[in-house]
């Protein structure tokens, strides 16, 4: 019996716990898009006022990431994740007392943004890098897909709650979910394979654990940024992921539901469509992880960004009046591409300063992703107020994706695929 039990490597348990934690975190992240219209109706605030809180949330979700990655290296994944979940729960619970727009910015923007940013995809990268040598790309794809799964599970339900019980019910549901996940992390997530007398899944016989960081977490994050900034490939990754965030979480993730509402679609129907994006995102991102284990990540990124750009140019012409077949085609196509960029990007982050600091590098690259998302969350709202619709925002984002698709081919041009995977 003991022999059979050991056939399941504990790395898979760590991946499963991380998956469900990220599912919950994605649910927390999806809530602002559901709250925009209800808060407009409840308080009479402008869409740009509400979107400012979303913009701050998205920005801090990213800027916290490199420091969270360094903190996880220094103090442990479990401790950082549990504190972050407690912060999210507290911030969301306190949101029910807001009376002014700046209250929303302070709580949903700063508090919840910092808490969710302390987990996010750096959490996935940390677990995958610690526990896996083989199947790392596949695991990164699955953990990235957890963000879509959370969106799939939570969006229609949160939208229904907001319509039937008011926006406060959404905040309380998010808070409860965050607090529930704290003991799950404490009980089931193990810190690293060495603590169990094991090696990462697929590690060679002569594998040795990387040395622990000798400097504090904040300094490690800053030193890594300073050293990485001398590498042009780092800036290609920063720029590409900036556009990735601008075209996904900032634009579609934040404004899809209110844009559909502008064109007469019911909020629950729009939320269901956005959740359907999440269904196909799960498929697309896991498949992207599988492809990253086998093909050149630069060429994969080229295909992903080019496809996304073309789809955004088509969006204003096919979407929103009702759920036509063309709308569903866009949802399927865009869903497959939503965060398929993550596994190849994480793979390329390991080439800048080596594998040992790949997660912190990715933290900074992910920060750029959220800066782009923050700009789009606020900028698209301003364009909508000034021009009356979101078409200009979609065209600008689509053009940037097409430019990015060619830029990513310049990353690590002198490295073979074998060296990329080392």
Image (cartoon, rainbow, N blue to C red):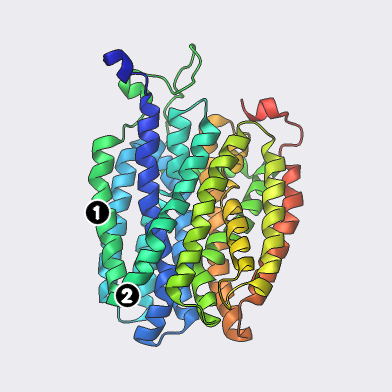
Q: Which residue is mark 1?
A: 179
- Contact between marks 2 and 1 (CB within 8 A): the answer is no
Residue 302 % position (x, y): 72, 47
Residue shown at the point (55%, 35%) measured from the top left? 137
Q: Secondary structure at mark 1?
A: helix
Crowding at dot 1, Cα within 10 Å, few <14 / some 14-19 / many 20+, comes out as some
Residue shown at the point (53%, 75%) measured from the top left? 260
Residue 208 % position (x, y): 46, 17
Does residue 205 lie above or below 369 as drawn? above
Name of the residue lying farthest toward the top:
205
Q: Secondary structure at mark 2?
A: helix
Can you tell which of label 2 and label 1 is closer to the viewer? 2
Label annotation for residue 197: none
Q: Which residue is mark 2?
A: 167
Q: Nearer the viewer, residue 358 or 187?
A: 187
Q: Can residue 157 be seen?
A: yes
Residue 225 % position (x, y): 56, 45
Q: Can residue 166 be seen?
A: no
Q: Nearer the viewer, residue 219 or 363?
A: 363
Please state, as top left, top right, bottom left or bottom right, where the C terminus lies in the image: top right
Cα separation between marks 2 and 1: 19 Å
Residue 189 % position (x, y): 31, 35
């Amino acid at each position: 019996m003991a022999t059979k039990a050991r056939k399941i490597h504990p790395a898979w348990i760590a991946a499963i716990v991380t998956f469900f934690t990220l599912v919950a975190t994605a649910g927390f992240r999806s809530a602002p898009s559901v709250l925009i219209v209800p808060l407009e109706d409840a308080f009479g605030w402008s869409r740009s006022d509400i979107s400012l809180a979303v913009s701050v949330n998205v920005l801090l979700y990213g800027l916290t990431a490199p420091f969270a990655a360094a903190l996880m290296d220094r103090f442990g994944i479990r401790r950082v994740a549990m504190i972050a979940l407690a912060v999210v729960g507290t911030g969301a619970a306190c949101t029910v007392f807001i009376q002014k727009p700046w209250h929303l910015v302070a709580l949903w923007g700063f508090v919840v943004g910092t808490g969710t940013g302390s987990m996010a995809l750096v959490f996935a990268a940390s677990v995958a890098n610690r526990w896996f040598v083989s199947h790392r790309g596949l695991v990164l794809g699955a953990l990235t897909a957890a963000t879509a799964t959370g969106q799939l599970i939570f969006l229609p339900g949160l939208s229904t709650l907001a319509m039937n019980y008011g926006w406060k019910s959404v905040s309380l549901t998010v808070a409860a979910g965050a607090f529930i996940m704290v003991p799950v992390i404490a009980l089931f997530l193990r810190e690293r394979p060495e603590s169990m007398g094991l090696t990462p899944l697929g590690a060679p016989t002569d594998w040795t654990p990387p040395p622990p960081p000798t400097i504090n977490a904040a300094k490690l994050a800053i030193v890594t940024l300073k050293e990485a900034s001398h590498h042009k490939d780092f800036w290609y990754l920063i720029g590409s992921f900036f556009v990735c965030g601008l075209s996904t979480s900032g634009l579609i993730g934040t404004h899809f539901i209110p844009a559909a509402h502008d064109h007469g679609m019911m909020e629950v129907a729009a939320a269901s469509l956005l959740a359907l994006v999440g269904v196909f995102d799960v498929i697309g991102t896991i498949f992207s992880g599988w492809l990253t284990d086998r093909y050149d990540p630069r060429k994969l990124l080229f295909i992903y960004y080019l496809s996304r750009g073309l789809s955004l140019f088509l969006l204003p012409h096919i979407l929103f009046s009702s759920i036509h077949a063309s709308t569903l085609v866009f949802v399927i196509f865009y869903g497959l591409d939503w965060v398929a960029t993550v596994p190849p990007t994480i793979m390329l982050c390991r080439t800048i300063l080596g594998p040992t600091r790949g997660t912190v590098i990715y933290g900074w690259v992910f920060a750029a992703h959220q800066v782009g998302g923050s700009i789009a969350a606020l900028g698209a709202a301003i364009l909508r107020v000034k021009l009356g619709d979101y078409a200009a925002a979609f065209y600008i984002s689509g053009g940037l994706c097409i430019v990015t698709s060619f830029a990513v081919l310049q990353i690590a041009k002198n490295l073979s695929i074998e060296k990329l995977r080392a």
